[in-house]
Image (cartoon, grey):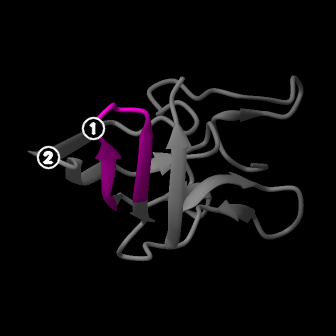
Amino acid sequence: MVGNPRYNPALGTYDATGNRLNASPKSSFSVSAQYEHTTRAGKIFARVEDAWQAKAYFDPTNLLVQSQKAYSLVNLSAGYTDTRNLWTIAVRARNVGNTQYLVTVASNSVEPGGLAGAPRTLSVELSERW
């Protein structure tokens, strides 16, 4: 930051006027759709979700090296619920496209480092309601 006209070395402060807040994309949206079909044996369902966000910065200076470009995450699930709505089994796939993204970035050394978001994950979920 030294040499940056917005940095005040006497106070150790940075004037971030007009910059984006940390980890705050300018826009984001999510959309989902679920289909359910009831049978005599219970209900089967399928669901798709998509969440998108614009570029986000992880530092008040809004430096590109400490930012995350826009990205989209797609999740899929399908399952079955019994006729009494007590048991559900579902297969879930998160981050289907195996999108690489950062959850946060920190500059604790010469090069910033980041915490990577979860890769593609597959799971089976069994739940009971009582």
> As rendered, which of 98 and 125 lies closer to the eye?
125
Mark 1 lies on a secondary structure that is: loop
Examine the structure image and report whether residue 86 is included in the region drawn in magenta: yes
The three-letter amino acid code for the residue at tag 2 is Arg
Report the side of 46 relative to 6 (left or right).
Answer: left
Relative vertical location of residue 92 with respect to residue 10 in this rendering, above or below: below
Relative vertical location of residue 34 with respect to residue 109 in this rendering, above or below: above
Q: Are marks 1 and 2 in contact (CB under 8 Å)?
A: yes
Q: Which residues are magenta?
A: 74-90
Count numbered badges in the picture: 2
Q: Residues within 10 Å of mark 1 (few under 14, many from 20)?
A: few
Examine the structure image and report whether residue 64 is included in the region drawn in magenta: no
Q: For residue 25, what is the image quadrant?
A: top left
Label the magenta part by its dominant secondary structure: strand
Residue named by callout 2? 40
Inter-mark Cα distance, 1 to 2: 7 Å
